[in-house]
Amino acid sequence: MLSAVILNSWRNGLSAFNSNDIRGVFNEEWDSLTAYKIGLVLGSVIDAEKIVVGRDSRVSSDDVFNSLTKGILDSGRDVYDIGLCDTPAVYFAVSHYKFDGGVMITASHNPPEYNGMKIVREDAKPVGYNNGINKLEELTEGEVASDFYSNKKEI
């Protein structure tokens, strides 16, 4: 077991952490390291062990998915990949199949260079800036310590 893992702090002065989601120009306002860090702390922030992840067809969605799910798995949580889908499919899966939370990788109506994440808790309750995204921002902007790094899992 790793006794301590410290990830370098990453921040370029632009925030992709918004009132209702995480979204911005991928590889400018946020990147794969940010996605990994979000995955690493997500389960603790939303109190989730079983997390559904879906994604849209943007070019960067697979990169975001791979980094996000690696972080989730490295934190000891379980990932349930529902593949390419729309946002309501993630919400339905979380609510109907009683998962603890979910992430939809999408930037909705924004241009293709954007990407982002919509996050929900149990029962598909939205996570906004005032009830979780702020904590994700705080934890991913600084150094992320081994508190969130435990047994690795596979998808």
Image (tube, rainbow, N blue to C red):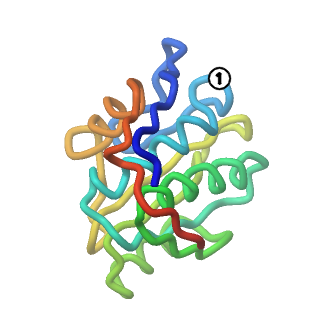
Left or right, residue 95 beside residue 130 = right
Q: Is 44 left, or right, of 105 in this rendering?
A: left
Q: Label 1 crowding class (10 Å Cα cut-off): few <14, some 14-19, many 20+?
A: some
Q: Where residue 130 sits: x, y (%)?
A: 21, 39
Q: Percent from the top left, x then y, of residue 107? A: 58, 46
Residue at the image point whose x is 68% and y is 69% from the top: 84
Residue at the (41%, 64%) spot, across then down:
76
Residue 142 position by quadrant: top left
Name the quadrant of the N terminus. bottom left
Looking at this view, is 107 or 70 the one in front? Answer: 70
Depth check: give the residue in front, 33 or 24: 33
The residue under label 1 is 28
The image quarter in which residue 112 lies:
top right
- The image shows residue 36, relative to residue 154, as above or below, that is above
Residue 98 x/y as whole percent: 32, 83
Residue 27 picture location, percent across and down: 68, 29
Number of residue marks: 1
Q: Nearer the viewer, residue 40 or 62?
A: 40
Instruction: Please name the amino acid that badge 1 sits on.
Output: Glu
Q: Is residue 30 above or below residue 70?
A: above
Q: In the picture provided, is 92 more to the left or to the right than 107?
A: left
In the rendered image, the residue lying farthest to the bottom is 97
Q: Residue furthest top?
A: 13
> Residue drawn 59% across and 71% down?
154
| Residue at point 36%, 32% (across, down) | 137
The quadrant the C terminus occupies is bottom right
From this viewpoint, which residue is outermost toward the left? Answer: 130
Front residue of this view, candidates 38 and 4:
4
Q: Is 131 situated left or right of 59 in this image? A: left
Q: Secondary structure at mark 1?
A: loop
